[in-house]
Image: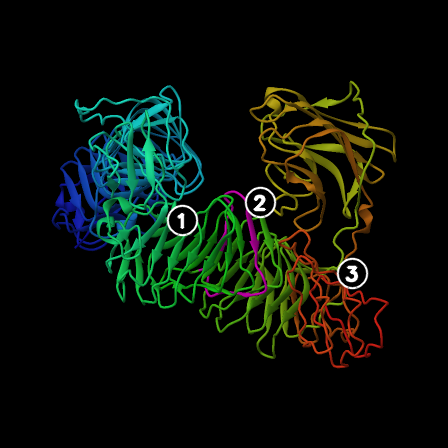
Amino acid sequence: MARYWIGGSGNWSDTAHWSTSSGGSGGAAVPITSDTVYFNNAGLGGTVTVDIPAICNYLSHSGNISGQYIFNLQANIRVNELISTYLYYFDWDTNNYDITCGCFGSGLVTGDLGTSNIYIVPSVDNWYQHGFNAQYLYYTGTPNLYVSTSSTLYTANNAHFGIIEFLTGGSAYMSSDTIIIDNLICNAGTGFGRSEDATFNIGIFTSIGSDESHIVIGTGFSSVLTLNVASANVSHTDFRHITIIGVASPITDAGGIDNGGNTGIIFTYGPSPSKSPSSSYSLSKSPSLSVSPSPSSAWGIKVAEADYDVKSTSSIHKWIDTEELRVNDTFTTTDGKVVTVKNSIITNIKVGGNRYWVGGTGNWSDAAHHWALTSNGLPSDGNMPTKDCDVIIDINSGINTGTITLDSFPNECRNIYCVSGDSYTIDGGTLDIYGSALFEVGVTVTNDLIKYVATDIGHTITNSGVVFPRNVNFEGKGGGWTLQDSLTITSDTPGSYGSLQIYNGTFDANDFNITCDNVDITVTDNIEVYMGSGTWQLTGNYGNRYPWYCDKEKSIVIHGETSTIKLTDATSNIKQFVGGGKTYYKLWLTGAGTGDYYIYDSNTFNEFKCDTPPHELFFQNLTRTTVTTFTLAGTAGNLMKLNSDNITDQFILHKDSGISQSHDYLDISNSTTLSTIDTVDRSSITYVWTTLTGGATTLAIGDDQVQGPFSLGFTFSFYGTNYTQFYVNSNGSIGFDNNPLDYDVSIPDSSYGPTIAGLVQDYNPSVGGTVKYEVQGTTGDHVLIVEYSKVPEYKTTNKNSFQIKVFETGKIEVHTLNSFDDDGNGVTQGIQKNGYIYNIDSNRNLETFSLVNDAVRWSNFSSSATTSIWYAGDNSLDTTNNDGWIFTSGPSPSLSPSKSPSLSPSKSPSLSPSLSPSVTPSNSPSLSPSKSPSLSPSLSPSLSSSLSPSLSLSLSPSLSVSLSESLSGSLSPSLSPSA
């Protein structure tokens, strides 16, 4: 039942403040466990004093009540589900009382949490909201967290906790990059993880598992979680990609498992802290160790304690989950390997090899009933697949139409091979695949997530028509995957989405089609995507994420090849294409949907097409969309509308050369068309350092500051605009407005104004060096010199010295004595007028480089031509604020070949798209380039002389049509190479 607070400030126990309706009469009973409690504007705000132990099912807000309510705890409070604190809706003054709930917070938490104990417990509904959700440090105090359910701890960077303890059943994904924990406690069977690099500063670290119940701490792939620990007591804890630093390093982990990527941890298999070793064994840890045959990643055992007297005839059927093996023994593993141990013990040999599913329907974690070492073999507890094992579901698995439920953490394998011939279901949580995948026809996948996390290349993915219902992720740093057939990811739940998410590595579509709700290419490390010649059909919309999202980071490389990105959403929701400033082949906006399209970033397309009027296309303001072919199919009464995404700034359509295709039935606003962007000359020149005089002005400029305006002393024409003032950014740039380019930014960037980026990175002149400027010369020959002398980069000591020179005669120069990139985040040098007119050297555009005695010049600013080649048509509307469009029909298309677009780099350095040398007279007219490295870039001289007059050669966009002079016979005049 609902309970609404009314009447402003008061006590929780006072029934006069409780109503059964918003703004209604008081007198309702105080909330109980099953009630949902709301605070809204009708409640009049104020301080809610919890004067008795308070309980309810859900505590939330209704409407925008930002800053209106303060919770003053004078007793404990328990909420079964969520305590929502979104957008400052509640301030807290806990007075150190306890809070118990399924989740505390839904974005922001404000007020004073003191040293309150916050218990995160299982709830009936909304399991996905378990945890602590305070992503910004807007509260004070050092609260204690006690977690007894699977949770997410969205903690602000540098948040400080007195205690975080994982109680029985507790685990958490930790979202913070940095966090301070005075006392971190993990009990048996618990654990926590992090998917990106992070550092946790921990006073006392206690992680005591048991033989039967280990603790798991780590990351899912190749990120590193650093624990800066002052004191530690650890056993039976399994670590992955963990680095221990601080006073306690290295820590000793008795009985735990090294899952790889760890430093600062000594894994031992001595007696458990909770038990004494058997006195009947004499154990030796001599460094000499003889193992025959040599173990490999394909097989092995993890050996522990001398509770088992292993003899030469023994066969180990499961992992020995104690600490040590008696010395001088010979034994046989279940996969037939004979191992001899002399004068030492074996520890932590990874178990690899094959794991066969047996026993029909069941849970992934139930190794005792479902995982065997051979097909139709005996299952055993010790056969649980690890990331080094190949998983095989075959004819002897007995699965039939049953279900394999992914219930473990993690569910992982190296390669997975589904070859049973049955029609079964894979359900449950996430499956981590460290190698290749072969799914089979008839499999139904309903699990939450497929993650490919390999850190090496050469892996293949065969989907066999399986439709994946949610996300398929590629996350392994350095990994490489190639599709062997089409990939389909379609949501099976209303309101959710099926997403292809590429976060790391190299993904090759291999000319196959991809169908999904959306594609998300977000950089964690380096990403390279080969899109092939297939169609990437995106069925999603803004209601379930952007159909296409690609980061602008330079570490993402998109090879558009000859692919088509096709947006086909059939709803009225908007569709957004966030291209990241990359080059694509074809973008096709189509389908029965009526929602608007939004195009973000300065992208390049060989073909841009929208063929289902009426639609409105919004382009991000101050961005440049470059096309070879631009096709809009408006009709009478169904105009295609083009507009900027704001009403003040234009967007730019750019075509390098040639006449734009004629268009008609358009409604155009806030648009500029260009044919030539920039003819500014850039050249290297002789380095000359100019000595400033005593009249130079020294700026008292601090870290990350912009100062100005200062007088140029003359008029300077920059891309056709005259300027008489300038501004100085402490990070190495000057601008002609108060927003010059800042560090960690590449050119162009429409969020910054007209800029000369001398050498832009994160400098800190407040701790060293000087920044000066001076105008020298005489009338007509003035030069402005802005000098950065011995300025260090932030938190480093290297000195950077360079001069930016602006000449009244129309030149710009940058002279560098020395420059260093100490933090590796990249340095930017170049000039820009705005987000689409600029001039750079791509090797100096947010790239890592150092310079000594270097100089560069830009000149010829007056020749920034904008000749229009864009014809809107006789029936189009020039609505507002347009430049460059000609609102008449254009000339008839020329029959001569037009300039070919640039094809993105091929997979092989030697790849040259061409027709094969073996072409014969009977080849089909649909000749197409192959990917063979041996292909040559021209038509072979061995072409037969009898080519059919009707043969039309369809060449790759970058193919240079070079017919050899040695061709015999005569080619028909109707032979038309077309780009």
> Residue 526 lies in magenta, yes or no?
yes
**From the viewer's perspective, is residue 380 above or below residue 99?**
below
Q: Residue at x 17, y 48 (%)?
A: 18
Q: Which residue is mark 2?
A: 555
Q: Which image quadrant: the C terminus?
A: bottom right
C-alpha distance separating marks 3 and 1:
57 Å
Name the secondary structure under disc 3.
loop
- Secondary structure beneath disc 2? loop
- Pick out the residue farthest to the front: 312
Q: Is residue 442 above or below residue 674?
A: below
Amino acid at the residue labelled 2: Ser
Pointer 1 residue: 414
Magenta segment range? 520-542
Amino acid type at circle 1 is: Arg
Quadrant of the image occupied by residue 806: top right
640 vs 137: above or below: below
* Horizontal and vertical percent position of residue 914: 71, 64
How much space separates mark 2 and mark 1, taking CA atoms?
27 Å
